[in-house]
Image (tube, rainbow, N blue to C red):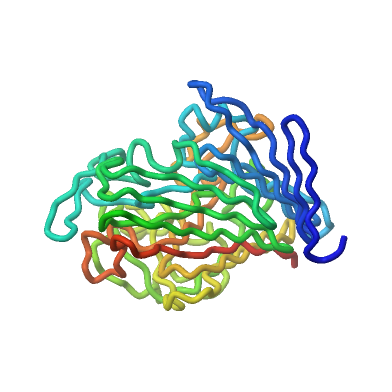
Amino acid sequence: MKLGILTLLVMATTMTVTADTTSVTKEAFGKMPDGTAIDIYTLKDGQIEARIMTFGAILVSLKAPDRGGKAGDVVLGYDSLDGYAGGNKGFLGAIVGRYANRIAHGTFVLNGKTYSVPKNDGENSLHGGTRGFDKVVWQGGVIENGVELTYVSQDGDQGYPGTLTVTVRYTLRGSALHIDYSATTTADTVVNITNHSYFNLAGAGNGDILGEQIKLNASRYTPIDNTLIPTGELAQVAGTPFDFRKATAIGERINADNEQIRFGKGYDHNWVLDSADGKLAEAAEVYDSGSGRVLQVWTTQPGIQFYSGNFLDGTITGKGGKVYGQRSGFCLETQHFPDSPNHPSFPTTALKAGARYHSVTEFRFSTR
C-alpha cells in the first residue's frame, strides 16, 4: 500500500480503515444493561494489536510478540462486555478520571471554595468517584492509525466544577501504543487522567509478575500514610525498597520490613520522575526473561504510580477463564501526584477555564 493512502471497507457492523501499515477495525461489542450499544476498535500493526472499547475507553487487550515471534495478550481483562459492565473491580484497562488516584477525605479547595467528591475508597475518593470515566460510555471515531474517544462530563459531575470535555486518542505506530489525553473546561477545575491497565509480560493470567525486572527513572517518591494518601514529602529512594533506578525483580523487596511497604501491602506509590519537565521521556522499563518481552513507558507526566496488583485476590475470573490472583499484574499509571489539590507544593492539577489539559503516554514493546 502506498504511503498515506486510506482504504475504507464498510459492512453491516464492521468498518476497517488502513493507514500506512496500521489497520483500524470497528465492530459491535455488545450492549449495556440499558441497551446502549458498545463498539470495540481493533488497531493492528504487524504483530502488535490493541483493542479499545467505548465503555470506559477501556484497553481490552494488547498483544505483543515474545522473543520467538509468538504474539500474546499482555493486559488483564475480560472476554466480553459483561465483565466490565458488571463493575470492573480493579479498573482493568480503563481510562480513569476526572481525578486519577486519590483525593484525601473526598474534599479539596479551589479558588477559596471547598468541593466534596464521592468517598469510594474508605474516607478517600479514588479514580474520580463512584461513577468516574471508567463507568461511562464514550463517543468513538476512527482516526488515522487509531481511535478517538470523547466524553463530556457536565458541571457538578461527581462534585467537580466545570463542564469538562475530554478527548483520548489511542494510536498504534509500529511497536508503540500512543495515548494522547486532552481536555478543556468551562470553569476552573482539577484534572488528572490516566490509563489503568494491568500488565503481565508473560501473558495475561500466566502467573504472578514478581520475577519481572523493573526500572523506574526516579530518584524520589511520595511516601503515604496508612490510607495511601501522600504525606507531602518527596523522599529519596536511595537505600530503600523503592530504589528501582537499576533493573530489579518486582518481588525482590516487595515484602520488606518497611512501613511504606506495609501501608501499600507492596508497591502502590507514586514515583517522582527525574524527567518531570513536560517533555516526552522514558519513565519505566519492564523485562520478562521468560518471554523476552520488554515494555518501555514514556510520558510527559511528572509522576508514575507503580502498583504491584496487591489487592487482586482471586475473585476476578478473566480472559479464557483464568483467575487473577494477587500480584498477577502490575500497573504503571502516568499521572500528576495523588491528592495534589491538597498539597500546594506538588505540581498543580488545576485547569483554568478556557485552558487545555494535555499529556502523552506511550507503551513501547520490544524483545530481548
Viewer-proximal residue among 275 and 7: 7
Viewer-proximal residue among 144 and 294: 144
Residue 235 in picture, x, y percent from top left: 32, 72
Residue in the picture at 69% in, 40% down:
26
Residue 10 in picture, x, y percent from top left: 77, 38
Viewer-proximal residue among 171 and 152: 152
The vertical placement of 260 against 13, above or below, is below
Residue 74 in picture, x, y percent from top left: 66, 49
Q: Quadrant of the C terminus?
A: bottom right
The part of the image, by quadrant, that contains residue 178 is bottom right
The part of the image, by quadrant, that contains residue 285 is bottom right
The vertical placement of 148 against 319, above or below, is below
Is there any visible trace of residue 248 in the rendered image? no
Is there any visible trace of residue 24 in the rendered image? yes
Residue in the picture at 19% in, 53% down:
108
The part of the image, by quadrant, that contains residue 221 is bottom left
Viewer-proximal residue among 155 and 315: 155
* Outermost right residue: 1
Residue in the picture at 51% in, 29% down:
85
User: With 36 as the anchor, is 227 left or right in this view?
Assistant: left
